[in-house]
Image: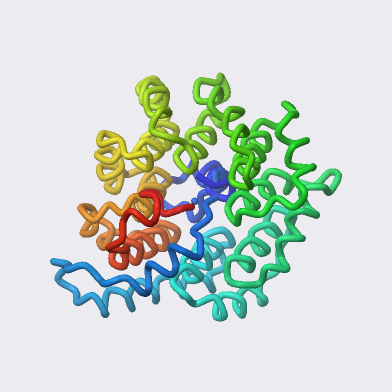
Amino acid sequence: MTLDHLQYAQETKPTPQNPEEPNVSYGCCLALIRPALVMLLLFTAPRPETTAAVPEANMQERCLTVLRTGLTANEFWPSMHAAEALSLAGHGKEVLKALSAKTATDDQQRCGLAREAYRAGDHTRAMELLTILDKPGSNGHTHAAESLFKIGVIGDGVKLRQACTQNANLKLKLMAAAALHRGGDTTAIDVVRPFVTHADSSARMIAAWVLGQIGQPRDIPALAAQAKKETEPLNAAYFAYALALLGDANGRKVLGENLRSTDTAVRTYAADFAGLCRATEFRERLIALLDDANLDTRIRAAEAILLIDHRSTAESSIPANGRE
């Protein structure tokens, strides 16, 4: 769940058969940093055997075609997700060229462009995120904090700590805490944990997403208990996906079932997290999603297949969620 994700889910909810971008933002945000180590593992590790009908080389090219189409699409946030996946796949120069042709309409989109340019190799763009975080009246504060979390940059941490202590904007608070934790403040995650049961459903969903990224097995009981209480499909899905990232078998089962959901946001996020969980057992379902009517679902499925097909044999060298 990224802010660009949740925002997109909210914008497209009235017509779930045609939505094109999640933001938790559909922007709570996919915050997720996929680090350089993952990239190295993807393209140097031995490839596991596959029973897919399509030869692996052809499948890889098919996925890259989906991502390249998404990168040049008019839908802004799906194009950012395609940029993320292509950078992870080692096509950073191609991504930077495409991003240079895109124009942001507000600070939220400026965060998206800066974040993906950073992930594509232009590390000077981190300063834009720090500037937006500190910009009075900006609509990009939460997106900036989320993006800083995803790329693992906190600057001097002053503005993030201020954001973490305020309560006027809970999404900003949670994303700032996540960024601080990734930046080395191991106590910041304690700010997030109580929000698993918060009255605000968006805050609960973001808290679950954050804990899926940086939480610990001891967070599973609280997440599982709250998951049973969630009545909104997208909220329940995010709790399941967080549980799957932390190694919970039932969460993983729900993730697989949700790859066939009729809810576009639920289905798209399932594709995103299936790759992060290395859910090889769901590969065929992901292949089917390459033909999904929704652009962002196709993009997330393509990224997940590349992650699954190129996962490392040295499993102990990287966490199961593929992020740190």
Kindly identify the residue that appears in the image at 17 percent across and 67 percent down: 50
Kindly identify the residue that appears in the image at 53 percent across and 68 percent down: 83
x, y percentage for residue 28?
55, 44
Does residue 267 appear left or right of residue 99 in this picture?
Answer: left
Kindly identify the residue that appears in the image at 67 percent across and 68 percent down: 123
Count of numbered marks: 0
Does residue 110 appear left or right of residue 65 in this picture?
Answer: right
> Can residue 293 be seen by looking at this rendering?
no
x, y percentage for residue 150?
58, 53
Figure coloring: rainbow
Q: Is residue 228 above or below residue 15?
A: above
x, y percentage for residue 219?
43, 28
Q: Is residue 185 above or below residue 231?
A: below
Front position in the image: 177 or 62: 177
> Can residue 281 be seen by looking at this rendering?
yes
x, y percentage for residue 108?
69, 53
Kindly identify the residue that appears in the image at 49 percent across and 56 percent down: 20
